């Protein structure tokens, strides 16, 4: 009798879970009935001062930014430890060294099937080498702009919200970072690159409703010039993840910015203290796990 009750309880849970998973759209219905694990994993890799974010669905491996040059060996080691052989999509938010620095090593170690960037050029040798490598390896290359959508597989979609033409200023690489919202069922994560106040304001005016996200990638490593209060109110994140190097010369994250996150009651995770931060979601709920 006891076993029967447990069995009935489990059956009810399964039925509820099945219909909950089906309620959003047809794509989810297909995913729920297939043997493919219905989960997304997002890892903000501890690469010191810089960004490198690994996203995996059952169908694709995506990397947003590649950390700084100094962290390139660490990035490659991490990806190999994860058993990754090829990368379906690399998105470079903007061409500063702390986002682009690992690209040459990445392409030397893995098959990269597609590269996206913001389309804003710069004059550095690092950037010129990056373009030359893409050309030499014949990697498909696409410029992203507000309104585009990139399929991450298994129903996960990256909705591009910025940059928008005309660029904010030709010199302002940070403000013209690719910003976009990863949506997976009810879970969402807003990626911001290194946008600062001007770009945040433009995002807020262009997408007043769409900015709302479960988790926010802290813009520009938690700098004082980003995370303006109206922007944070529009995003209303439950958690903020900051990619930042210990004792970095820029003093990121700024204490005024940490106070703003506290004021909006968001839980804060930061790679200098927590190590690599791993977020998993089944499209309904989510978990955030710290390396240390
Ligand atoms: Zn940066």
Image (cartoon, helix red, strand yellow):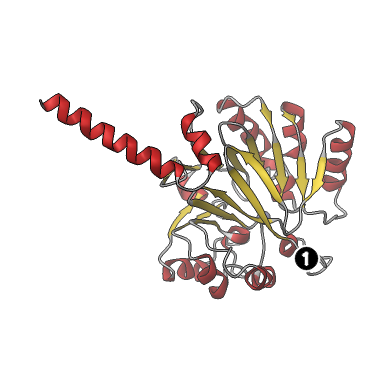
Residue 33: x and y in percent read 47, 30
Residue 223: x and y in percent read 60, 65
State the image quarter where residue 58 is shown.
top right
Q: How many marks?
A: 1
Rendered residue at 53%/69% (across/down): 232
- Of the 4 image quadrants, the one containing the C terminus is top left
Foreground residue among 185 and 22: 22
Rendered residue at 74%/61% (across/down): 163
- On the rendered structure, is 268 left or right of 196? left
Foreground residue among 137 and 210: 210
Res. 64 visible in picture:
no
Foreground residue among 122 and 177: 177
Determine which residue is flagged by label 1.
172
Secondary element at image label 1: loop
Rendered residue at 29%/37% (across/down): 13
Residue 55: x and y in percent read 58, 40
Res. 140 visible in picture:
yes
Residue ranking furthest to the left: 1
Neighbour class for label 1 at 10 Å: few (<14), some, many (≥20)? Answer: some
Residue 180: x and y in percent read 64, 55
Foreground residue among 152 and 216: 152
Rendered residue at 69%/72% (across/down): 198
- Of the 4 image quadrants, the one containing the N terminus is top left
């Amino acid at each position: 009798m006891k076993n029967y009750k447990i069995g009935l309880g489990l059956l009810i849970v399964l039925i509820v879970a099945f219909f909950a998973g089906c309620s959003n759209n047809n794509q989810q219905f297909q995913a729920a009935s297939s043997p493919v694990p219905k989960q997304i994993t997002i890892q903000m890799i501890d690469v010191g001062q810089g960004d490198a974010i690994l996203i995996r669905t059952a169908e694709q491996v995506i990397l947003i930014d590649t950390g700084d040059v100094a962290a390139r060996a660490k990035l490659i080691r991490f990806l190999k430890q994860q058993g990754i052989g090829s990368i379906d999509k690399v998105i470079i938010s903007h061409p500063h060294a702390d986002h682009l620095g690992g690209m040459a090593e990445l392409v030397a170690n893995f098959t990269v099937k597609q590269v996206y960037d913001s389309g804003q050029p710069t004059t550095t040798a690092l950037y010129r080498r990056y373009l030359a490598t893409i050309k030499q390896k014949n990697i498909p290359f696409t410029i992203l702009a507000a309104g585009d959508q990139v399929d991450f597989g298994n129903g996960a979609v990256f909705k591009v919200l910025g940059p928008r033409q005309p660029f904010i200023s030709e010199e302002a690489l940070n403000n013209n970072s690719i910003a976009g919202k990863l949506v997976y069922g009810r879970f969402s994560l807003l990626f911001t690159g290194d946008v600062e106040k001007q770009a945040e304001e433009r995002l807020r005016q262009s997408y007043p409703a769409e900015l709302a996200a479960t988790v926010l990638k802290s813009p520009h490593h938690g700098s004082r010039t980003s995370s303006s209060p109206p922007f944070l109110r529009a995003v209303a994140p439950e958690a903020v993840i900051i990619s930042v190097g210990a004792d970095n010369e820029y003093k990121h994250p700024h204490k005024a910015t940490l106070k703003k996150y506290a004021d909006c009651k968001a839980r804060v995770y930061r790679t200098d203290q927590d190590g690599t931060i791993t977020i998993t979601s089944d499209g309904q709920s989510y978990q955030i796990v710290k390396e240390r």
